Amino acid sequence: MLFSLAFRNLARNFRRTLAMVLTIGIGTGALLVFKGFNVGIMNQYRDNTIHARYGHGQINMKGYHNSVYEKPWKHWIEDYDSLKKNLSKVPGVKLLFPRVNFFSLLTNGEMNISGKGQGVDGSAEFSFFNTLNIVEGKNLSDEKEGIILGKGLARALNAKIGDRITVLGSTIYGSMNAVDTYVTGIFHTGSKEFDDSVFRIQLDLAHLLLDTKKVESVSLGMKGLGLWKSIEDFVADSDIDLESIPFHVLDKVYYQHSVDWLDAQFGVIQIIILVIVILGIFNTVSTSILERRQEVGNLRANGESRIEVLKLFSNEGFLVGVFGAIFGIIVVYAINLSFLKDGILMPPAPGLTRQFHVKIELQEWMAVQTFIIGTVTSFVATFLASLRVINQKISDLLRSV
Amino acid sequence: MDTIFSCQELTFSYSFGNVNIEALRGVSMDFQKGKFYCLSGPSGSGKTTFLNVLGLIEDIQGGDIEFEGKRFRNLKEEDKNYIRRNQVGFIFQHFNLFPVLSAEENIEFFLVRQGVPKKERTDLVHKALKDVGLWDHRDKRPLEMSGGQRQRVAVARALTKRPLVIIGDEPTASLDQKTGKEIVNLLKNLSDEYGASIILSSHDTMVHEFAEELVILKDGRLT
């Protein structure tokens, strides 16, 4: 009957109850949206990291990633074809991207600029690495002699799409070599150092220039997230001394630090939202309870203990919390499925020149978590507000009007 | 006749602003079971304080009260709650009904809290509604009833608890003379039937006429 009384008390003062439900609903909804937005941003970062530069991770010879060698090719993977054959059998592996890095001179006949080359499988990478920020032309695909240049490098060479560029370098045996290319695209990552020095050509062309068939690393495109463990298992069981490095380790500065930073920021904002909701509920509930002091006095005079009275108000707080949290969650889901179904248009992120949509990625665990937070917040605020009244003397409570 | 309350040298004071008011100054008296008492006296004489101390609404400061073999001084909180819930019924000047509950539910509420089984509860409530003449109004909420009807609900609510004593602080003060008389008459008749003692406070001479014993207080002392 206490629960029924609590329910009816809420229905009795509809406007006040509505205000409390809205306060909880808005607070819960704000938390849910903020969580979903953060997950959306983090997923964007993650997808950008995976589909612009690193894939889901890479394999190289053990210790290579964190070492500097005078002759790095001595530590490259010797038999890529064999490795490719074995890797293709690993569950979850979708695409393989063999790569080499090398230093060379680029010349257009008028000037020479040094740069850092990347030999990539353009055809394979074209479809997977689809978030590389191309500012002119297009990404490298099946153009055998194509080259894409970093924005700063292209500016230094005064290169335009279709211009001929000769790549000069030394083979792994120390003799000079050169390959001819033409510009198919210009990219911009936002990292000045990267954009001023890096260019990409086809892996076959790079092999020709370096006079080797070795690959420095193999980036991997997996069928989904969470499948990297199979690569780690493969590397552990491999006869070759390899190491596997997932994308979040490869891109610790950009991706992992962003995730950590957003997590910390979210924690602070969550506390702020909770404090605002608690104060809002506390204020509304306090007013309501103060107006019902005579009722509390009546209950106490008829033998209800302080705990029982506290239960009555806490029941009300709990009910408001449940209604408010459900209301907030439903509204957020409804808005997300209608007005925000394409996400929120965001200005270019650091390192990008294009706008992008961040989707509010709502997950079941978030709804459950925010529901619990909303309900508990309401319960706690009501509990605290009730404490002030139930500790008053019965005679004082009965005298109040 | 058995004694229900035995009061010895009750004293009680409280602060009102900077002024210390001695509401009870050594009140000693016995209340007999089944009898109708009316406390009277000028405003500030200590009537409400005396009732509050008898009903365990105020803690005892000085002296003591013996009630059903228990002494109120140093009584545990759960014992106080038990007495208030099961052995004392209250009727207030402003009725103090739950506005969200119907007349029937208001009467039933404290029976639920007493743990009375559903069947017995229903019988008690229905009898009480008929006894106070509110059977046709049982579904109405307090705001849909007149002052007299509300006080009838309060009387029914107090009686169905089957208390040993009913304590009422100015129960007719918010009612007109005719309605007040009906309520006190009803209370007296039903308390005889239900076997409860009655202790009311009132300035009203009409109420005094119903009382079997009039207790006059002045400046916190019995006269």
Image (cartoon, coloured by chain):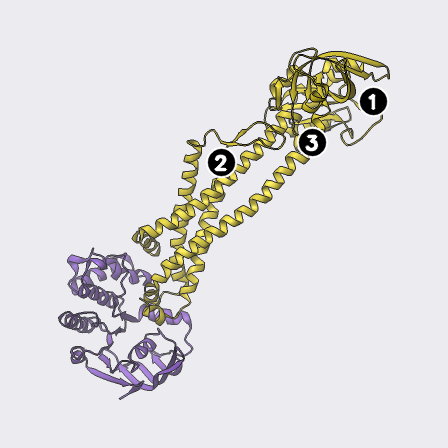
Chain colours: A yellow, B purple
In the rendering, which numbered label is found on residue A74? Answer: 1
Q: Give the total number of marks visible in the rendering.
A: 3
Q: Residue at 63%, 29% (x, y): give it.
A: A49
Kindly identify which chain the residue marked by label 3 belongs to: A
- Rendered location of residue A343, percent (x, y): 49, 31
Nearer-N-terminus badge (2/1): 1
- Rendered location of residue A401, percent (x, y): 31, 66
Query: Could you classify mark 1 by the number of other residues whose Cα lies within 10 Å: few (under 14), some (14-19), or many (20 or more)?
Result: few
Q: Residue at 15%, 57% (x, y): give it.
A: B136
At label 3, the amino acid type is: Leu
Q: Which of A154 and A24 is in front in this view?
A: A154
Q: What element carries label 2?
A: loop
At label 1, the amino acid type is: Lys
Q: Which of A146 and A93 is in front in this view?
A: A146
Kindly identify which chain the residue marked by label 1 belongs to: A
Is residue A83 placed above or below B30 in the rendered structure? above
Rendering quarter of residue A79: top right
Q: What element carries label 3?
A: helix
The residue beneath circle 2 is A362
Kindly identify which chain the residue marked by label 2 belongs to: A
Is residue A286 placed above or below A137 in the rendered structure? below
Most extreme residue toward the right, as rendered?
A174
